[in-house]
């Protein structure tokens, strides 16, 4: 972590009398002085900056070349006097920026790399691009697998903030070595792929042209990618020059990693920690289901300050209250329905747990089956049924049970505009209940859409069945005619 020095002025008064200490030598901060006469000594006292932007500001090294200032002005103009956008940037970094910055500095990497998730996803771990890239670092499935990010029915490492950060920084380090220490080319390759960047470099070499990032013919999204980051660095370095105020983010960890003994129900984890389940989901987006992956990782991220309570409560639990797993050896005459019934589990879930594409099973083979009271409770997840009475509407039912109208519509596959019928059965869950992979949260339906040549705001809106005004509001677009190829729009679907 970077250190800051604040000056401490010390007045050392020495008497000239015979009882004075003669020629006392004082060594402070590698400076030697004598005490013949009053001296002002400047002592360096190291302490970390309170604000994370200040910590970043002193270590920024990458800049936009003078000959590219004009070419990057369009990105600068989008942030100039745009306090709303700057507020959003600061808010999006509150949970995870301390971690990405700390890891980059621990690995002696440029602090600019810690800021890449601002450009990739605005630090939204649930963001998904139209190409299938996921998480704050926007890993494609193939690249995630290549860099060791586990992905299965239970867990997706591409959305795990800690795992994906490790993979991204390793990938960027590899790319930096591949491109002979040029971080701009490494970042361009992270976005477009090393093959595409190498091809552009070879083309320029053959034509006798320079091979800086700025001189290469790369996809429009990549051409915009690096300037966006560097302009953001300019803003962090000197927000006053953008006529904005950069809201403070405390220079301290937001979460800490806590080991768990095995698979743990996320609702149960929230109860143990004294948190709302949505807080658990927000900090542990890698877990796709209602519980952690039985094969690991065996940890949870929890807000600073609650881990002691969580560990104490977890240690006091009876092991029977946790989900446990058996390896069940299939017997002659068994079928999936019989096994599922024995363990009180749905056949479809049993198949998904064991990655089975058909109902065919073979005697002598083993499959994983869950047992324990925690799992049994999960099979009927805090569900209640409400019968619609005269005068009821989705609005008053949502208020009655303290859930949203959208949640009720999702749980019951209802059309919001269609009136309810008297005695109609409505399923109500906890507002934080996770039903398989469908979580009733706008945050989980974020899509990052790169603008293509010929796109307009209205055309994009029509493609995704949303309104133009929504796209403008979500992306703070004042003039819809000024979107451009390579620009990445955030859509909530």
Image (cartoon, helix red, strand yellow):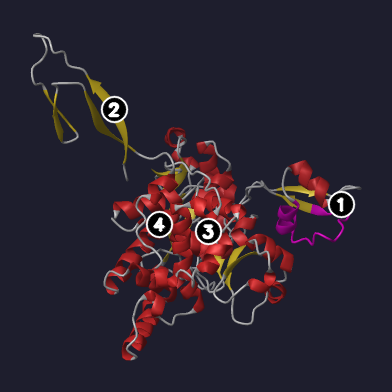
Q: Residue at x 31, y 58 (%)?
A: 109
Marks 4 and 3, Cα distance to the nearest angstrom? 12 Å
Marks 4 and 2, Cα distance to the nearest angstrom? 36 Å
Q: Quadrant of the N terminus?
A: top left
- Is residue 99 one of those drawn in magenta? no
Q: Which residue is the site of mark 4? A: 114
Horizontally, residue 94 falls left or right of residue 477, namely left
Q: Which residue is the site of mark 3? A: 122
- Numbered label attached to residue 237: none
Span of residues in magenta: 405-425
State which tag comes first along the sequence, 3 or 2: 2
Horizontally, residue 399 falls left or right of residue 3, namely right
State which tag comes first along the sequence, 2 or 1: 2
Q: Residues within 10 Å of mark 1 (few under 14, many from 20)?
A: few
- Residue 117, placed above or below residue 17: below
State which tag comes first along the sequence, 1 or 4: 4
- Numbered label attached to residue 9: 2
Q: Secondary structure at mark 4?
A: helix
Q: Residue at x 56, y 63 (%)?
A: 77
Q: Residue at x 46, y 33 (%)?
A: 309
Q: Residue furthest right?
A: 390
Q: Position of residue 389 (x, y in %)?
A: 88, 47
Q: Secondary structure at mark 2?
A: strand
- Comparing marks 1 and 4, which lies closer to the viewer? 4
- Comparing marks 4 and 2, which lies closer to the viewer? 2
């Amino acid at each position: 972590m970077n250190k800051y020095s604040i000056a401490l002025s010390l007045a050392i008064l020495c008497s000239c009398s015979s009882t004075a200490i003669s020629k006392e030598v004082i060594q402070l901060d590698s400076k030697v002085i004598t005490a013949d006469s009053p001296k002002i000594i400047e002592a360096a006292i190291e302490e970390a900056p309170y604000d994370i932007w200040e910590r970043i500001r002193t270590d920024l090294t990458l800049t936009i070349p003078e000959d590219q200032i004009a070419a990057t002005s369009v990105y600068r103009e989008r942030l100039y006097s745009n306090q709303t956008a700057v507020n959003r940037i600061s808010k999006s970094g509150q949970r995870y920026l301390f971690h990405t910055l700390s890891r980059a500095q621990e690995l002696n990497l440029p602090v600019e790399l810690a800021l890449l998730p601002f450009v990739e996803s605005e630090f939204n771990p649930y963001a998904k691009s139209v190409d299938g890239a996921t998480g704050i670092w926007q890993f494609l499935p193939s690249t995630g697998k290549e860099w060791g990010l586990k992905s299965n029915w239970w867990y997706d490492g591409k959305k795990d903030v800690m795992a994906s950060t490790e993979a991204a920084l390793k990938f960027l380090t590899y790319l930096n070595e591949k491109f002979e220490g040029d971080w701009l080319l490494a970042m361009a390759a992270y976005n477009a792929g090393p093959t595409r960047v190498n091809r552009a470099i070879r083309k320029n070499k053959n034509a006798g042209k320079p091979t800086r990032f700025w001189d290469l013919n790369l996809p429009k999204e990549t051409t915009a990618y690096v300037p966006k980051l560097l302009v953001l660095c300019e803003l962090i370095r000197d927000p006053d020059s953008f006529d904005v105020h950069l809201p403070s983010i405390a220079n301290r960890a937001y979460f800490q990693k806590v080991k768990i003994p095995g698979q743990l129900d996320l609702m149960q984890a929230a109860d143990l920690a004294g948190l709302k389940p949505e807080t658990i989901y927000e900090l542990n987006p890698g877990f796709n289901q209602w519980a952690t992956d039985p094969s690991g990782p065996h940890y949870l991220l929890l807000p600073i300050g609650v881990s002691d309570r969580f560990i104490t409560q977890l240690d006091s639990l009876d092991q029977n209250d946790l989900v446990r797993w058996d390896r069940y050896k299939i017997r002659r005459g068994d079928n999936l329905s019989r096994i599922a019934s024995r363990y009180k589990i749905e056949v479809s879930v049993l198949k998904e747990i064991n990655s089975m594409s058909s109902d065919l099973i073979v005697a002598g083979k083993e499959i994983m089956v869950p047992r324990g009271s925690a799992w049994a409770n999960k099979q009927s997840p805090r569900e209640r049924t409400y019968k619609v009475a005269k005068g009821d509407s989705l609005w008053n039912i949502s208020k009655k049970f303290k859930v949203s109208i959208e949640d009720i519509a999702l749980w019951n596959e209802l059309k919001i505009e269609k009136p309810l019928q008297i005695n109609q059965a409505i399923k109500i869950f906890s507002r934080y209940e996770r039903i398989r992979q469908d979580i009733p949260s706008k945050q989980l339906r974020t899509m990052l859409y790169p603008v293509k040549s010929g796109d307009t705001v209205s055309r994009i809106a029509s493609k995704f069945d949303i309104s133009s005004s929504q796209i403008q509001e979500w992306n703070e677009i004042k003039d819809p005619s000024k979107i451009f190829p390579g620009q990445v729009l955030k859509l909530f679907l």
